[in-house]
Image (cartoon, grey):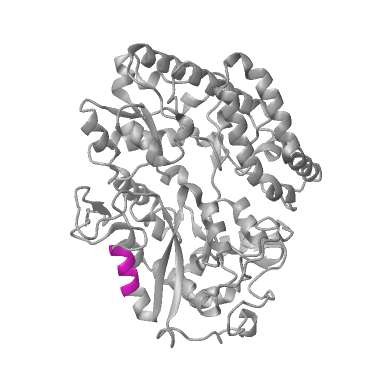
Amino acid sequence: MGKRKIMSMFMTLLFIAALIAGCTGNSTNSSKESSPSDEGTSPNQNAAGSYPDYSQGFSEKVTMEIPVYERAFEGWNVTDNYYTRWIQKEFGDKYNIEVKFTPIARTNEVTTYQQLLAAGKAPDIIFHYDMPQALAYYGEGVMQELDWKEIEHYAPTYWSNMSETIQQYGVVDGKNTFFFGKRPDLNNYGNFVNIIRKDWVEKVGMKVEDLTSLEKYNEMLMKWKEAGIGVAGAGLTRNVFNYSYGFRDWPTDPKVHALYADLSVADFTTTATEGWLRNLSYQYHNGLIDKEFYLRDDDNKLKAEFVAGNTGTYGLYITNNTDVFEATLKNNPGAEFAVIPPGTGVPEGNVPQGRADWTFGLIMGINHESTAEERAAVWMYLEWMSQPENLMFLQNGVEGENYTLDSDGLPVKDPDFKGESVLSQNNNKDYWALITEAPTFETPELTLKANKNNWTPAGYEQIVEDMIKYRQEIKPYQIQDPLFTVVLEKVNEYKADLNNLFQELYLDIVLAPEDQFDAKYEAAKQKFLDAGYQEILDEKQKAIDAGQFR
């Protein structure tokens, strides 16, 4: 990749992506701006079928840099392992491509990307799971315009699978900008679960199924405290702001939802946030949660407290090779585990609302410094990974070692396998998520069965069954984020500062004596509004009044 200096000036965002894309005539025949290839080759200079032929490989070695999330899995090197070497051998060597993997800190990915971009060392793909941040990258001018026909030429299988999504959601300001990973219905296939020490619950005379509301949950936590058992796990809230869903009104007013629902900016001035803060203050001052929750700013720290037996709750993406149960049992031989019912975070009278995902997974763009050859290499990589045999290998490993096939032809992993081809703790997802968020098979039933095989640690089948059951129960209360059809410039202008200010203000409120809550919160709300939030609300309200959202 070139190392040209990155412009820091934000371009105006006309967020018509996805919203008007299907109606604007932006098809594969649209005109394209020039690619920043060193050779000056732009996609629109190629007539259909006249793209360079790289099927036998590049004449000169091309270096392709692919981002991969760094989750700090113990003993796992995200940039150099059995599978990165396999990718190089099977794909890179075949096409004369050097495949490099760039680690992106999962808990601090925006900062990581910003640093890499500023240094001219960002990978060829720039990705994020949330559209507002993807648009922010676009607004910084760090993504190049794409040619849909070029993708189709070099990645016909990938294009066939994703073209509808790409053409519907991938156009920004009339420019072909984003491509996507597939997201199957994660109400069926999502694997994030909150677990609780079942033995602790029963030790204080309650049952997990008794935890039907926040009030019942706090009652149980008080019994934990009185019995000297332990506390609930808790961590620092920052960067992603979906904390207040359980305190929001139902049914949802679409205009209120559009005004306040925003992953990148906290709804700090709402009654929902006030309810969340009051509960957190109550839990903190009554010794119901980890007293140093504000120091637990990544998953490893939260996990360590649970494994040590200090806390009785923990949330994780569960896989059949997760080590959290085994590690906890080593320190706490009598530990038993269960899924926390979704009502535990919801005050009586409310419903377990949550954020519904879009139909796409990773949102991706091509680095504006990538050459035409590097861009073509990315399309070829997506095509190669889209082949079922390659996806199968990345998701499951070596047949007969990592897994065997059951009577339905589905992979069943050996959870005790520790050989050279051992998978990462999330089944290598951070490599194949460029293609899909979950393995899929011929029918929904087979897909669910296969994913249950992937998710279920031996002996913990009930955890996964309950996770799926609860997900179906809350499905009616999941709602997608609003999408605006006009620029929300103030969000991009203020969100970073408001993120930092939120952390300062909410901790000041929660850690202060309870009798100072009202005064602290009122002052904090005004400070938050004055720091740019009022301008964001005014801008959103203007768009809402004009019907410029959905």
Q: Is residue 85 above or below residue 457?
A: below
- The majority secondary structure of the magenta stretch comes to helix
Quadrant in the picture for residue 422 = bottom left
Residue 360 visible in the snapshot: no
- In this image, 279 relative to 287: left or right? right
| Count of marks placed on residues | 0
- Find residue 520 and report its horizontal and vertical position in percent: 66, 22
- Find residue 226 and report its horizontal and vertical position in percent: 37, 11
* Residue drawn at point x = 69 percent, y = 76 percent: 31
Observer-nearest of 114 and 387 = 114
Indicate whether residue 416 is drawn in magenta: no
Q: Is residue 477 above or below residue 381?
A: above
Observer-nearest of 537 and 32 = 537
Q: Is residue 51 above or below residue 277?
A: below
Residue 444 visible in the snapshot: yes
Q: Is residue 23 above or below residue 500?
A: below
Observer-nearest of 328 and 399 = 328
- In this image, 452 relative to 491: left or right? left
* Residue drawn at point x = 64 percent, y = 84 percent: 45
- Find residue 47 and report its horizontal and vertical position in percent: 61, 85
Which portion, as a residue range, is magenta? Answer: 82-89
- Find residue 125 and report its horizontal and vertical position in percent: 51, 65
